[in-house]
Amino acid sequence: MNEQNYLYLYPHCHIVKGYNRSLLQDTFRGSYFFIPDLLATMLPKMHGATLLDSKMLFTGNSHNYFEEYVIFLQEKEAVNLSEISLDYQKLPLDFQYPAIITNSIFIYDKRNENQQTITELIKNRCEHIQIFVNQKITSKKLKTILSLFEDSLVETIEIVVSFQKPFLNIQYWQKLYDQYRRLQSAVVYNAPKTEKISVDCLNYNWVLFINEPVSYNDCGAIHPLHLTNNLLFFTESQQHNTCLNRKVCIDAGGNIKNCPAMERSFGNIKDTTLQEAIEKEGFKDLWFINKDKIDVCKDCEFRYMCTDCRCFIKDPENIYSQPAKCGYNPYICKWAGQEGYVPVEECGNYSRETGFVPDAAKIKELNQQIWGEENE
């Protein structure tokens, strides 16, 4: 290893420090890996420095691990070693998007069955739409709805529908996906059994059958399979709420909301345009509550990959309260169901005035019990 070489952290690799461990999030490959907290602290200083100068940053016993750290980072393709000094530009992390609405949930019901709502979503350049059909619907009617999005800027559509016998035929879905290319996925509830079937692997089309009723009140669960890792999501998460930012929802009664499960309405599609609703006082407030402002989330190493709905929170009186359906404890690095898991409440104290305050002594004791000497 030539100690005169310069080390550069690739711009798409981002250091994220949590309370108990750190990770490098690769937004190009959609992967992440854990790194020692010391390395997370030193990497910004190592960027652009020679290996010799970088090595001098590590004192004591950590000095002996420096070469292993560099080799590990090379194997993960997180760093570039160069014989000459380079001008590595940082990626801008400002979230800029050419549309005021990027995603929407539309509860399709006979009470709001009109083309005007869909026309408005298209007019406002909404790109991702979930259509939750709140009633029995014929195949013909479903196709009529999907045809309204032809020649639009909508990129993806997900439909959520109640089970009918034709839906069991995978060829039915294959033809539907072939005919309506914006249709990306479907959820069929009240089905005979629960299973997920890939219909077109090339285009990532799938159908999820669920053998029970579903509701938009079921959303908000945080699970490792729900983590999203790409540059667009990462940049949005720096300043915005990744669930509610630029989202507009229309419930079964035609009420315009941030989320269908929320009580507050900003008008009804019968007398209010989506643009008018968005510009009303308070509608955009939730757009700017990012994970760095939320109790517990701000201490989590997964915070820039994780979505968040302010509808389901532990303390409804505190808009910065931890998500109620989160199954991860960042203070002990355990998901619910894993051996040694304890809820966040055992790692600190809640209060209306201060929110959640971690108890460092209690957390240290828990980690020693769970992880033993390796965590000392």
Image (spheres, grey):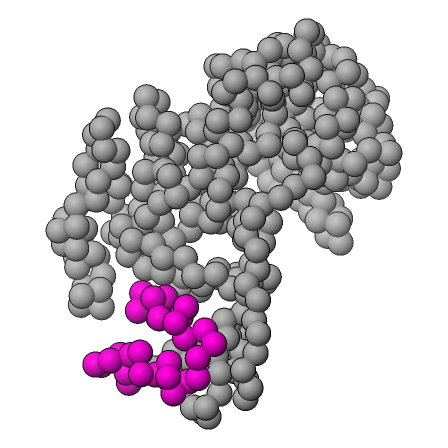
Q: Is residue 374 left or right of residue 70?
A: left
Give the image location of residue 20, x and y in percent.
28, 56
Is 4 drawn above or below residue 97 in the view shown?
Answer: below
Residue drawn at the location 35% of the way across and 45% of the way down: 298
Q: In which quarter of the image is residue 325?
A: top left
Residue drawn at the location 43% of the way across and 90% of the way down: 3
Main secondary structure type of the part rendered in magenta:
helix
Q: Is residue 246 left or right of residue 32?
A: right
Give the image location of residue 5, x and y in percent.
49, 87
User: Is residue 56 in the magenta section?
Assistant: yes
Quarter containing the N terminus:
bottom left
Comparing 249 with 252, the one in front is: 249
Q: Is residue 253 left or right of residue 262?
A: right
Is 73 drawn above or below residue 64 in the view shown?
Answer: above
Comparing 327 with 271, the one in front is: 271
The answer to whether residue 350 is visible is yes
Give the image location of residue 36, x and y in percent.
33, 68
Quarter containing the C terminus:
bottom left
User: Is residue 144 in the magenta section?
Assistant: no
Instruction: Please give the range of residues in magenta.
Output: 36-64
Q: How many labels, in total?
A: 0
